[in-house]
Amino acid sequence: MRVWAGLTLILACSPDPQPVARLSVTSVPPPSSLLRLPAAGGQARLYHLPDLRQWTWESSDTLPPLQGTLGADLASGLVYLVSRKGEVLSFDLQTARTGRDRFGGGSTAALGPDGTLYTVNDSLVVTQYLRRTPKRFPSRLSARPRDLFGGRSSSLLTISTGETSQLTLLRPGEEPLTASIPSGDATATLWGDLVAVAADTSVLIVDPRMPDHPTSIRTSGHARAVVFSPSGHRFYVARREGPLQVYNRFSRQLIGDIELPGLAGALRMDPFGRWLMVHPVGQDSVWLINTVANRIAGSFATAWSRDLPAITNREVLILRAGGGLAAHDLVRPGFPRSGALADAGPDIWLPLEWAPESAGAAAPLLASTKQAPGSGPASPNGDEGVFLQVSSSQNPEWSRQLARQLEQQGLPASVVNPASEEEGYRVVLGPFPTREIAESAGRRLGRPFFVYQPDR
């Protein structure tokens, strides 16, 4: 049964998911599109998913030649691009125009999970841009970083390499925390609360807030790459010899092996942790891992680059095929090709949880949240109103992230704090004036929901 797979996977990957009281089987999909950015300069274009039909939307002005993208801050409707001159510029999805702001340090820049932009200039000064407002960190870096990871509360993780590698945590108003770490492929959780380094004979796990107390996990077969699941509950280790290894992030214990037909190189996750992409060493192909069954589900011939292959929020695999582009529907058996473009060129591709009509699609639901005449204000943490609960989790950061994603789709989302240790952080939509209106809105929502009344 095909029931809005995207949010079902989010709930499956969330910590301690709660049972779903009712399931809407309406066909309202989440917004999803594929942005094409011209590497040689020109007009940005947008494509439908999963069939790759071109939208009538295109950029209103001409973009300069580009070397890449840092990602999207959908709460602000912005995509951050890096020009070939090393400048960071913003591109507004609603107006389809580039912003007037220019940010330095394009060759060394990162976008945090909360939409905060970080840049490092030639003098190794770090500047953060929160809602386009610049603020410099008081301490400079000791060396140019190889990796940048935006974290929670406007914090930044940097990894620099030289004679030794150094991990640095920068937080507003605090002295930097630093630690020496082994060289090797490094990754961080979505919110930057943990770093993992593939250090050949071991995997080093570091809490950036306590960098002097790392955990070393001995591994055989020479660890060469590591990646966290989006929820941060698991991490996957690729080795020069032997199967892919799966570890529990909290217990640090090996919980599974995934047999591969060859040697694994780079690793890349999908947005919800349902699929893992593996780049075989020395091959132009990708192995697709089903992380629920811990086995290979498919193999595709394709080049591996910084932007592709990628999996969208609606489980569509986007990859280069010859000189063009191909889309495969991962929800349907056999992963059939759902769309193709004859000429992809060297352009840059960015999947988005956004579509030009997404705000309009949410209008009926937004209209139903208006208060009835004479009713007072309602709050999910208060005792009035009716809400739709779409998730419950023990992880507050994860719940806030999901609420932001729903807000980006034009939905009235918020997080209800737990009233006791047994409860989770509820992600809710509303308030609605009556239970009947809430249930009607839930049926149009196209995703699992509870009706939640704080006063009951």
Image (tube, helix red, strand yellow):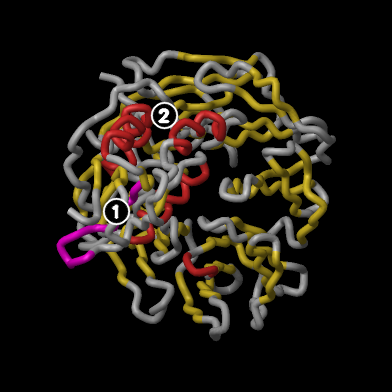
Distance in Å between CA atoms under marks 2 and 1: 25 Å
Whether residue 242 is visible to the viewer of this picture, yes or no, is no
Q: Nearer the viewer, residue 221 or 413?
A: 413
Q: Which residue is mark 2?
A: 315
Q: Specify the quadrant of the image occupied by residue 449.
A: top left
Q: Residue at x 18, y 37 (%)?
A: 21
Question: How many tags in the picture?
Answer: 2
Whether residue 124 is visible to the viewer of this picture, yes or no, is yes
Q: Which residue is mark 1?
A: 426
Query: What secondary structure is found at the residue carrying circle 1?
Result: strand
Query: What secondary structure is found at the residue carrying circle 2?
Result: loop
Q: Which residues are magenta?
A: 419-428
Badge 1 density bin: few <14, some 14–19, many ≥20, Cα 10 Å: many
Which numbered circle lies on residue 238? none
- The image shows residue 111, relative to residue 293, as above or below, that is below
The kind of residue on which mark 2 rests is Glu
Q: Specify the quadrant of the image occupied by residue 233.
A: bottom left
The kind of residue on which mark 1 rests is Arg
